[in-house]
Image (cartoon, rainbow, N blue to C red):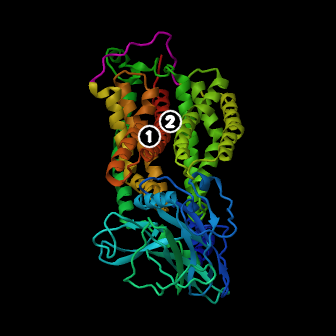
Amino acid sequence: EQRAAPGEANIVALHSLARTMPRLAARALALIASAQAFYLPGVAPRDYMDSDKVEIRVHKLSSPRTHLPFDYYSLPFCRPDNLVKQAENLGEVLHGAVIQNSPYEVFMGRSEFRIACRVELTKAQKITLSQRVRQDYRVHLIMDNLPAATKMIAEMADGTKKDMYDRGFRLGFLGSKDIPGTEPTKPYVNNHLRFIVKYHRSDTFPGSRIVGFEVEAYSVKHTYEGQWDEKSPKLTSVPLRPDLAPMLAWSNEIVYTYDVVWEHSPIAWASRWDLYLYMGDDQVHWFSILNSLVIVLLLSGIVAMIMVRTLRRDLAEYNSVEEKEELLEESGWKLVHADVLRPPPLAAWLATTIGTGMQVLCMSFISIACALLGFLSPANRGGLLTATLLLFVLMGVPAGYGASRTFKSLRGVEWRALTLLTATAYPAAIFVVFTLLNLALWSHGSTGAVPAGTFVALLAMWFCVSLPLVFVGAFLGFKRPLPAPPTRTNEIPRQIPPQGWFLGRAVTMAVGGVLPFGAVFIELYFIMSSIWLQRFYYVFGFLALVLLILIITCAEISIVMCYFQLCAEDYHWWWRAFLTSGSSAGYMFAYSAFYFYTKLEITKLTSCLLYFGYMFIAALVFFVLTGTIGFYACYWFVWRIFSAIKVD
């Protein structure tokens, strides 16, 4: 059944409920209903009549072992007479996609066997083809905006079996004793493809709609009579039989063939991506959410105890006129009221980091919101990465505003230098790492290497869009006056008493970082699997919940650690507030190393550099994101508690 029908019914029901429900709740439910109905707004299905040509495009070659994408035609495959490249968006280019036409001729409803071509291999082509087979490369094709997939049958926890799709199909395989007719460790190429095209018909539209594109790859050593005739070759290996020998990759010639099988499917066009986007049992995600909620409830209880019991008692004592003389000899967070707002060292760097964190936070919120609405579906190839980059550039205003407000509260005055630092510091660090990784890709001839034109476009987005927007945000932030500080700052700093080992920076960072990471690490596993094991990720509802839990966890753990620090009469809380929750990025990078050694089979040095280089960028982004959340939570907490005490 199509998803649109129940979605429309939900929307109609929401219109009647909106009159009685609060406006915000009605809008939220309407968004949920529309997200269930359409996952890719603006894309209409294409109806094919019988014998209409269905175009197959080649996408790229990729491997989970090397992560070095290559052009499809870098290997000795059949080529069309006129090679035409399709325009790609920014995300597709960064993913290494080179979408081009193919020599495969497929017509709607016509099941047939065809010979693609015969290719004579040079020695260099034999070496490259054999190497790609050993590296477990997969071939990616596209039909009607659907990626080619290999069908798999997975057994569920309850014993039932479910069809699943694996992206692309294997270029070849290595021989073994278990495969008849093969020699162990010898590479064999899949030179015969069976396209199983699933279509759906209904009385509501004319013709047929394609709802599935499966590929079964076979290795067949084709034989033919006499000399090869390009116009009418006569194969003696047709029809295909199980006793035919497989095709060695190290051969002088390879005959490529394919056949097309059409199957009617009850799956509607609106649901055709379900098998691609299936993420396994949802119970794992719910377990992650419940695990995170336990952490949140624990921290919430601690914060509530601090705010309701301890702080109320402290405030009552500090504001009691009769007990003021007795409190002079005691210790506590109130005694640092004249130093709690003293600017920290490297104030400009702190403000810069906070501004970048605001930029990442706003980008994350909008990106996930767009994904929930369906605008960033995997059907829109490269859309998620393109939108993320564009949103990061456009969020220059929040970056400049957050950095300038923080810098102004730290008594900074050089707002132009701060703005320039905010717009260039962290983006420059990421750009340097990205450039070095791009050089490594370029040295291997991979399509993952960003072309010079794309580099210029990225630089133009940075300096012509992001930089001016950061200046606009900084101007607005410095122009707006700050609220009156809750306390005055003495000219002479107060001496900090000796601190216990459990209040040291290393200990508080270790404790403060493990809880936010523990709230997200299960979902992080699925995200990393989608990136490094080439799987789809489309559970953005769970991701939105995890982001919300992450924000709450970072805020609460930072407040708790900040309170303990102030009670020990240590007023250097500015950087500590950021580093307490920001240290979760260290756990994230350590987990990426664990994931590398336990889940991946990467052996090439360049691939290792790519993995750890990109994970370093991800950890850096996570660092500024979580640190900014913790900083603002402590900023609000300090202002709140010191505004509530009476200071002479």
x, y percent for residue 49: 67, 86
Evaluate if marks 1 and 2 touch, with contact meaning CB atoms under 8 Å apart. yes
Instruction: Calculate the distance from the C-alpha at mark 1 to the C-alpha at mark 2.
Output: 8 Å
Is 493 included in the stretch rendered in magenta? yes
Q: Residue at x 50, y 30 (%)?
A: 639
| Quadrant hosting residue 27 | bottom right
Q: Which residues are magenta?
A: 486-500
- Residue beneath disc 2: 632
Mark 1 surroundings: few (<14), some (14-19) or many (≥20) residues within 10 A: many
In the picture provided, is 590 more to the left or to the right than 343? left
Is 156 included in the stretch rendered in magenta? no
Residue sitting at the far top:
492
**Amino acid on which the number 2 mark rests in the picture:** Tyr
| Quadrant hosting residue 413 | top right
x, y percent for residue 223: 47, 80
x, y percent for residue 259: 53, 82
**Amino acid on which the number 1 mark rests in the picture:** Ala
Considering depth in this image, is 543 or 49 the residue closer to the camera?
49
| Quadrant hosting residue 288 | bottom left
